[in-house]
């Protein structure tokens, strides 16, 4: 563990602010390893060049490094081709791309888009926008009070009118790991396309897209040791080929005249304009770093942290954990007595603990649970049991104070 923490400048003690902080807000964004930061700095200091445009030496270095990250992602997800990996700005933009491009082409009035009760706003609002323009409607797969999706109900909701199913793999609020393998198989039996929101699972679960078989997968690099401003969209090649471009601009074209434009091949058809080059190049280092530890090891360690933290927090009187699914990732949402989550967050911050409070961009989920929000501790493989103990003691102090 000490060795792993040494890989992150955040823990180096070199900064007077981070030195005093216990960071338990990994579902919002993860910390960044030195290898990724060094590569990012190297691009901006010594290898700055645009890609796929110029033919000078620096441009060919940055172009090949950029494409190497695409290859690394293809391997990471076991996609069948690099043409299936599209770089976007964020998971949010990836969903908007699918909703706008595919949604506009296949949805008709009274077609159905299936979402779940625990979706992030970024997997709700893009579908509402497209439902409005196409006349399609949104239906919501319900869940039980423990935060588990009702699969029986899901089966009943599937029919030939359902064209798209878009479901979160791991809930950012509850930590629930949804049974997406079964849900994907069922969706395909009815001819519906399945979009997997892997924003919270990319760093915490091994995903083999050929085995799991989603039609699309979305995630954000910043939630997996990468930088902000970079999203990933995986899509099956045949589908991406059939879809119209999402945005127009440089690089997504073969030929332009004022009369007519011929679009570029995959993946460039969906990558209009200058992409976040340094962020893409540096993300390869994040992927290599994750693989050097091993996703199974990460999962094992985080599961142990989750058990330890769940046990520690349930010992605090009047603390209620929100989300008690049987299959959970290392995210714990909770309420402390009647104290408003924002007040708990402020008092935790005063004791040096960084946790997120509020609705976590899942307002419909809060409405379903009839709560104003939660306090959320979200862990990563560099967190320690001692940090969990500190959280427990800080919460006991807050309770005593009240
Ligand atoms: C489950 C889930 N989906 C999508 C997103 C959107 O990610 P981004 O804001 O990086 O686009 C988030 C971010 O918190 C998330 O937790």
Image (tube, rainbow, N blue to C red):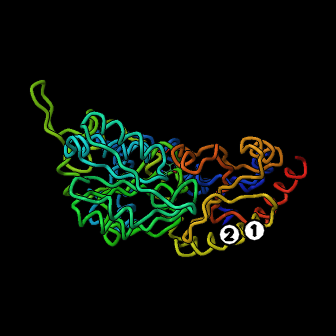
* The residue positioned farthest toward the top in the image shown: 258
The Cα–Cα distance between marks 2 and 1, rounded to whole angstroms, is: 7 Å
Front in this rendered view, residue 38 or 230: 230
Q: Percent from the top left, x then y, of residue 11? A: 73, 56
Q: Residue at x 71, y 58 (%)?
A: 320
Classify residue 130 as left or right of residue 141. left
User: Within the image, what quadrant is residue 77 found in?
Assistant: bottom left
Front in this rendered view, residue 132 or 154: 154
Instruction: Please tell me whether residue 116 is drawn above or below residue 209 in the rendered image.
Output: above
Q: Percent from the top left, x then y, of residue 119? A: 47, 50
Residue 54 seen in the figure: no
SS for callout 1: helix
Circle 2 packing at 10 Å, graded few (<14), some (14-19), many (20+), is many
* The residue positioned farthest toward the right in the image shown: 400
Q: Residue at x 30, y 67 (%)?
A: 186
Residue 259 seen in the figure: yes
Q: Percent from the top left, x then y, of residue 241? A: 18, 51
Find disc 1 in the rendering and name its residue.
Answer: 385
Circle 1 packing at 10 Å, graded few (<14), some (14-19), many (20+), is some
Q: Percent from the top left, x then y, of residue 139? A: 36, 49
Find disc 2 in the rendering and name its residue.
Answer: 305
Q: Is mark 1 within 8 Å of ligand 1?
A: no
Instruction: Please tell me whether residue 181 is drawn above or below residue 16 in the rendered image.
Output: below
Q: Of the numbered discs in the image, which one, if any, rests on residue 25?
A: none
Classify residue 363 as left or right of residue 25. left
Q: Is mark 2 within 8 Å of ligand 1?
A: no
Classify residue 32 as left or right of residue 61. right
User: Within the image, what quadrant is residue 127 found in?
Assistant: top left
User: Within the image, what quadrant is residue 122 found in?
Assistant: top left
Mark 2 and mark 1 in contact? Answer it, CB < 8 Å: yes
SS for callout 2: helix
């Amino acid at each position: 563990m000490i060795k792993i923490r040494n890989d992150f400048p955040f823990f180096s003690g070199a900064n007077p602010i981070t030195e005093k902080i216990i960071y338990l807000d990994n579902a919002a964004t993860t910390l960044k390893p030195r290898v990724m930061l060094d590569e990012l700095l190297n691009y901006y200091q010594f290898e700055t060049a645009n890609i796929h445009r110029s033919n000078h030496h620096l441009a060919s270095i940055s172009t090949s490094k950029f494409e190497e990250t695409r290859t690394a992602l293809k391997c990471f997800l076991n996609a069948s081709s690099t043409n299936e990996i599209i770089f976007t700005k964020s998971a949010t933009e990836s969903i908007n791309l699918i909703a706008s491009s595919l949604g506009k082409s296949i949805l008709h009035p009274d077609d159905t888009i299936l979402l779940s009760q625990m979706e992030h706003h970024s997997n709700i609002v893009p579908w509402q926008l497209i439902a409005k323009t196409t006349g399609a409607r949104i239906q919501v797969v319900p869940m039980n009070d423990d935060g588990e999706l009702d699969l029986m109900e899901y089966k009943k909701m599937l029919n030939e009118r359902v064209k798209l199913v878009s479901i979160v793999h791991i809930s950012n609020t509850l930590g629930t790991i949804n049974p997406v393998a079964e849900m994907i198989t069922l969706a395909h039996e009815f001819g519906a396309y399945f979009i997997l929101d892997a924003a919270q699972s990319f760093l915490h679960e091994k995903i083999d897209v050929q085995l799991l078989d989603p039609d699309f997968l979305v995630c954000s690099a910043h939630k997996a040791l990468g930088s902000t401003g970079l999203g990933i969209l995986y899509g099956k090649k045949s589908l991406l080929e059939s879809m119209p471009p999402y945005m127009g601009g440089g690089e997504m074209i073969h030929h332009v005249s004022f009369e007519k434009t011929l679009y570029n091949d995959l993946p460039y058809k969906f990558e209009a304009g200058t992409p976040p080059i340094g962020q893409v190049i540096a993300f390869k280092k994040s992927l290599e770093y994750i693989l050097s530890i091993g996703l199974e090891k990460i999962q094992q360690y985080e599961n142990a942290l989750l058990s330890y933290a769940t046990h520690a927090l349930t010992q605090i009187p009047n603390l209620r954990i929100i989300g008690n699914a049987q299959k959970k990732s290392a995210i714990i949402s909770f309420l402390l007595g009647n104290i408003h989550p924002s007040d708990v967050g402020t008092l935790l911050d005063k004791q040096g603990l960084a946790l997120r409070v509020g609705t976590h961009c899942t307002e419909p989920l809060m409405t379903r649970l009839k709560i104003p929000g939660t306090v959320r501790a979200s862990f990563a493989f560099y967190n320690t049991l001692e940090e969990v103990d500190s959280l427990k003691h800080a919460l006991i102090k807050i309770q005593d104070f009240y």
